[in-house]
C-alpha cells in the first residue's frame, strides 16, 4: 500500500538521517516507526484495560481505601501540604 505523508522539514531530516545510519530505505524506516508506534499504543491500551479491570475486581472484593486515606498517602508520597 502506498501512503503519502506530509512531514515537517525537521522530521524529514531525522527520518533521512536514521535511514542513512541504518543503511535502509526511508520507506522501510518510516514503516518500522509507524508499526512500532501502533504496537506501543495497543500495549498501552491493553495495560489500561487490565488496570481498570483489576481496580473493579478489587473494589468488588472490598479491597479499597477511603478517599481520605488516599489523599493522605499522596500528600506523604509527594510532600504536599
Image (spheres, rainbow, N blue to C red):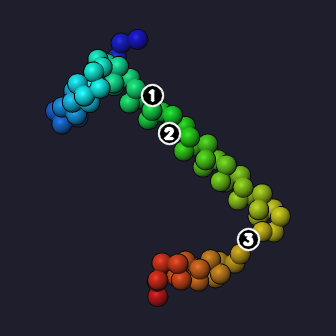
Could you tell me how far apart the alpha carbons at marks 3 and 1 are, in whole angstroms?
38 Å
Q: Mark 1, residues whose alpha carbon is within 10 Å: few (<14), some, or many (≥20)?
A: few
Report which quarter residue 71 is drawn in: bottom right
Vertical position of residue 70 compared to residue 30: above or below? below
Local secondary structure at mark 3: loop
Of circles 2 and 1, which is in front?
1
Taking the spot 27% from the left edge, 21% from the top edge, the residue there is: 23
Residue 72 location, x and y as percent?
Answer: 59, 83
Q: Is residue 41 left or right of residue 26?
A: right
Taking the spot 78% from the left edge, 68% from the top edge, the residue there is: 63
Mark 2 or 1, nearer chain start: 1
Residue 2 location, x and y as percent?
Answer: 36, 12
* Mark 3 lies on residue: 64
* Mark 2 lies on residue: 41
Taking the spot 22% from the left edge, 34% from the top edge, the residue there is: 14
Mark 3 or 1, nearer chain start: 1
Residue 31 can be seen, yes or no: yes
* Mark 1 lies on residue: 35
* CB under 8 Å between discs 2 and 1: no
Q: Mark 2, residues whose alpha carbon is within 10 Å: few (<14), some, or many (≥20)?
A: few
Q: Is residue 68 left or right of residue 38?
A: right
Of circles 3 and 1, which is in front?
1
Instruction: Quarter of the image for the N terminus: give it.
Output: top left
Residue 26 location, x and y as percent?
Answer: 28, 21
Vertical position of residue 78 compared to residue 9: above or below? below
User: As drawn, which residue projects farthest toward the right?
Assistant: 61
Local secondary structure at mark 1: helix
Amino acid at each position: 500500500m502506498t501512503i503519502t505523508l506530509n512531514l515537517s522539514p525537521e522530521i524529514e531530516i531525522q527520518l533521512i538521517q536514521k535511514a542513512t545510519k541504518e543503511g535502509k530505505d526511508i520507506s522501510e524506516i518510516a514503516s518500522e516507526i509507524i508499526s512500532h508506534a501502533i504496537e506501543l499504543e495497543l500495549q498501552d491500551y491493553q495495560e489500561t484495560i487490565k488496570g481498570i479491570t483489576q481496580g473493579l475486581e478489587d473494589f468488588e472484593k472490598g479491597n479499597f481505601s477511603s478517599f481520605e486515606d488516599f489523599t493522605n498517602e499522596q500528600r506523604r508520597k509527594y510532600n504536599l501540604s
